[in-house]
Image: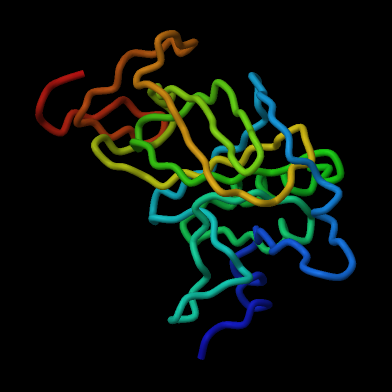
């Protein structure tokens, strides 16, 4: 039997559902939101990893043929009700679940919009977000990648699922027809002050990187 929506939300934690715009009749809340362009060069963004799975965020309001919640690729979240439908996948750390819940609760949807984007990253790398831009129906961000600090557990040569959750300083219309990302690896400039992790190393917490054979930086 497919799980109910209430059961999914109760067991998996939080929730994003981009609703449809109102049809004929009374105009819905989306009708008062904006279709504008802009850029934020110091964006507020939450980065959530799932080291044990292929997805980070799921749509608790929609299921596939097997009754499983549908993974979210990209989404504009324009209300607290829609944010409540965001489901965090298994494998995501409890601390990140709490961070996401606080992030959504602190968003003023009367003046702000949350943009969710799915990304992938090497286990031993992290993304530095430089800017996010929006046009009617489209959101793009710029980034570079750098090594994670050596006290963060990682496994070289392994990719992990990553969700980027932006808080945009504008009440955008919820329609999203396109998205994009551009960046470089590694970052040209970085504030990190630790040595390069060996390409074939696993870093278990605070311990020194372990060489598993093979060279390269």
Left or right: 150 as drawn, with respect to 213: right
Image position, residue 189 (x, y; %): 44, 8
Name the residue at the front extreme. Answer: 24
Circle count? 0
Q: Quadrant of residue 107?
A: top right
Camera-nearest residue between 178 and 11: 178
Q: Residue at x 46, y 11 (%)?
A: 190
Camera-nearest residue between 157 and 110: 110
Above or below 37: residue 116? below
Q: Residue at x 43, y 32 (%)?
A: 152
Camera-nearest residue between 60 and 151: 60
Q: Residue at x 49, y 10 (%)?
A: 191
Image position, residue 71 (x, y; %): 49, 61
Location of the C terminus (image quadrant): top left
Camera-nearest residue between 63 and 127: 63
Above or below 151: residue 18? below
Name the residue at the right extreme. Answer: 26
Image position, residue 94 (x, y; %): 58, 52
Above or below 183: residue 56? below
Q: Please, which colouring scheme is shown?
A: rainbow
Q: Residue at x 77, y 68 (%)?
A: 23
Left or right: 81 as drawn, with respect to 45: right
């Amino acid at each position: 039997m497919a799980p109910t929506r209430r059961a999914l939300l109760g067991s998996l934690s939080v929730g994003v559902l981009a609703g449809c715009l109102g049809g004929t009749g009374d105009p819905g809340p989306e009708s008062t939101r904006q279709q504008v362009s802009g850029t934020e060069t110091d964006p507020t963004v939450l980065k959530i990893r799932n080291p044990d799975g292929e997805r980070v965020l799921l749509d608790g309001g929609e299921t596939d043929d097997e009754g499983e919640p549908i993974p979210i690729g990209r989404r504009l979240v324009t209300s607290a009700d829609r944010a409540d439908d965001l489901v965090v996948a298994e494998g995501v750390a409890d601390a990140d679940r709490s961070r996401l819940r606080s992030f959504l609760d602190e968003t003023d949807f009367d003046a702000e919009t949350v943009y969710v984007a799915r990304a992938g990253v090497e286990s031993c790398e992290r993304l530095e977000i430089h800017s996010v831009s929006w046009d009617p129906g489209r959101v793009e961000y710029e980034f570079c990648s750098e090594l994670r600090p050596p006290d963060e557990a990682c496994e070289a040569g392994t990719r992990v699922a990553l969700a980027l959750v932006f808080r945009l300083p504008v009440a955008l219309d919820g329609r999203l027809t396109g998205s994009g990302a551009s960046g470089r690896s590694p970052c040209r400039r970085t504030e990190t002050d630790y040595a390069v992790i060996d390409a074939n190393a696993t870093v278990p917490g605070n311990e020194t990187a372990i060489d598993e054979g093979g060279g390269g930086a």
